[in-house]
Image (cartoon, rainbow, N blue to C red):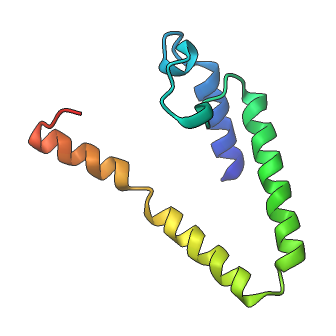
Amino acid sequence: MILAQLALLYICIRYRPRLSPENLGASTRPFSFWQWQTYTQYLEFLAAFILCQSILFLILGRSEIFIAILGFVALGLESTLPIPQLISARCMASECRP
């Protein structure tokens, strides 16, 4: 599944519209986070993230508190995934404008 997501990310970056806000430098995200120009920049971030997580797990892996916090953060993050779709559906139903 992770390989499929990386393949989709590659396709999205390769065929990104030339006039997208990311390409024009008009990103509203702090430090243009997660809107890098090349696929290798995404892979570098993912490699660094995996390395940091691995080091933390090797150091704190036997701590029940660390495992509980890790599970709580993962579950909390996953539960927020449908929020943009819910907002979009609500706006379409009520014709709200941002």
Label total for image: 0
Instruction: Left or right? Give the position of 49 relative to 16.
Output: right
Instruction: Left or right? Give the position of 60 relative to 66.
Output: right
Residue ID at (69%, 41%): 6
Residue ID at (62%, 25%): 13
Q: Looking at the picture, how far across and down is residue 42, in whole percent?
A: 72, 36
Residue ID at (50%, 19%): 26
Q: Looking at the picture, how far across and down is residue 81, in whole percent?
A: 44, 56
Asked where in the image residue 18 lies, by quadrant, the reply is top right
Q: Looking at the picture, how far across and down is residue 80, in whole percent?
A: 43, 60
Query: Is 18 situated above or below 3?
Result: above
Q: Looking at the picture, how far across and down is residue 5, in whole percent?
A: 63, 44
Question: In the orientation shown, which residue stands out farthest toward the front?
Answer: 30
Question: In the orientation shown, which residue stands out farthest toward the top?
Answer: 18
Query: Is 58 situated above or below 30?
Result: below
Residue ID at (49%, 17%): 20
Query: Is 56 situated above or below 80?
Result: below
Question: In the orientation shown, which residue stands out farthest toward the left?
Answer: 94
Question: In the orientation shown, which residue stands out farthest toward the bottom?
Answer: 64
Q: Quadrant of the C terminus?
A: top left
Instruction: Left or right? Give the position of 13 relative to 77.
Output: right
Query: Is 32 situated above or below 87?
Result: above
